[in-house]
Amino acid sequence: MIESVLIRVYRLGAWLIIISLSNCFIFYPFVEKSLEKENNAEKYALAALYILSDKEAPKPGNGGTLQKLNPGNAAFTLSWSGGSDDKTDSSSLQYRVYVSVSDNIRTAGEVEANGEPLNSFTSSLTSLEITTLRIRGTVSYYNVLVMDSAGKKSAYSSVSATIIPKYFYALNQTDNSISIFSINKATGNLTTVATLTGGNSPSSIYIPPRGNFLYQASTGENKIRLHSLDTSTGNLTFVNAFTGGSGVISLIADQEGRYLYSADSTSSKLYMFKINSSDGTLTALSAGSVATGSYPIHLSTDPTGSFLYSINRDADAVSQFVINYTTGELTSLVVSSQATGSKPLQASIDPLGTYAFSVNSTENTLSNFKIDSIRGEWKQYATLTTPVGSGAASILFHPSGSYFYVAESTSNQIRQMSFDKTNGILQTLATPTLTQSGSPSYILFDGGGKFLYCVNKTGNSVSLYTVGSDGSLAFNTSYAIGNSPVHGIIYHTVE
């Protein structure tokens, strides 16, 4: 089309003169070194004329509407209709998704100035999976830019996504059961839904990002039990069981919910699986497993989803791995392990991925680590340990990264501290501890950090706390659950 309107291209010094049928002269800078042959000048001139003739930006499809589809645990699919353009074929239009923590990405200019890109410009793209790695806080804002071949861009209509706690699940070890509750998103209060029985001496439960299913580490039968999760009621239905090692005890997925890893405390290995995103079915990866230190008891990943860490209770160490993004397989880091204190039980990594702590049950201490931002390795720093109360069993950063909490099962209390993000130092709050009877053994927050739930092993209960603006906890109430609860998990939806 453009060739039919072009009459002649002349070179005059460092300029090209393009003459069109409309007798319009267009001067275009000619850069000698960018052209291998002089006759390439016409090709570049044609491109310049094409750009100058494209007067309109592309039009977003369906009026620019963005949809949040297929909601799973704290995840969803961002979907849109393809756009159109007066010069560029629809198949050649390119799309890029942006996120912001504020409602400041409504126009194309605002999107590029304020938004964080989540992908590269991609042709024919009409959806993107939004999981943990692409969520920025409790409320995130998303928009899409569509770009034509001339580089002109238009924005769709931005949409917000709010992460809402919906269901709470408590694992009762002696009862071999899971207590199911719905969560009031405004108050955090729990309402009983049902109790599901199954498994043998289970140790932990886990819901992967974007998944509508729950896994149970059934230690006594050496199985990973899969349950489908009814998002309208919270009820669980047993589906199948998979071999997760001879002593499966802890479970975790990568940050996008594509791969599951199980810690086998008996053989001191991590088993690796591919997750079927539609039904949660597990398929063992070709590598099968990797070795850890003795008695791996707790697994964690860094916020970027690049590294996985295994706390090894009887080795007094943490094993360190890199996650292959494409295959999901684990490979030991150059520094494959780092010493902790005696009998570590759990680890917690700050939301920025800069610092980590392990809780050491024999010494009643925290081991303090700084994380190498490139290599992912933990290194002890400054004050190597922080003393805590007797029977320290569970530790947790607040989602803001500004506060840190310890459940102390023998002391029957919860310790609350502030965290300096610059130097990694913990300081006790004005009220250092709160009494919590019943052997508090596991603590967890909702995604927004408004509520803390404490699972009490001998009290056969879960306690609800609200979190103040200064990080201080305020007791609300407790709820009866099954016998010897040891773990809990929250399912979050997206609104």
Image: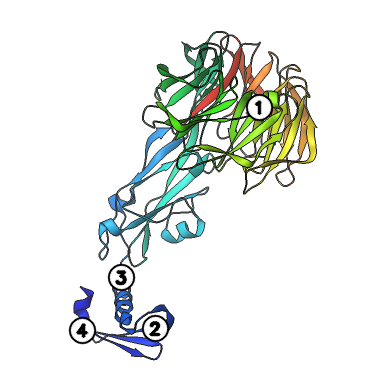
User: Could you say where residue 450 lies in the image, as x and y percent from the top left?
Assistant: 59, 32
Where residue 66 sits: x, y (%)?
A: 36, 46
Location of the C terminus by quadrant is top left
Amino acid type at circle 3 is Lys
In the picture of the structure, the residue carrying the numbered disc 4 is: 21
Q: Position of residue 474 (x, y in %)?
A: 68, 26
The residue under label 3 is: 55
The first of marks 4 and 2 along the sequence is 4
Mark 3 or 4 closer to N-term? 4
Above-or-below relation of 177 to 163: above
Real-space Cα distance between discs 4 and 1? 77 Å
Mark toward the start of the polypeptide (3 vs 1): 3
SS assignment at label 2? loop
Q: How crowded is mark 1: few (under 14 residues within 10 Å), some or many (20 or more)?
A: many
Question: Can you tell which mark lies on residue 30?
Answer: 2
Mark 3 and mark 1: span between their CA atoms?
A: 63 Å
The amino acid beneath tag 1 is Asn
Label 1 belongs to which residue?
Answer: 312
Residue 477 in which image quadrant: top right
Q: Image height check: is 214 above or below 7? A: above
Q: Nearer the viewer, residue 369 or 424?
A: 369
Q: Cα distance, mark 2 to mark 3?
A: 23 Å
Seen at 66% across and 27% down, the residue is: 312
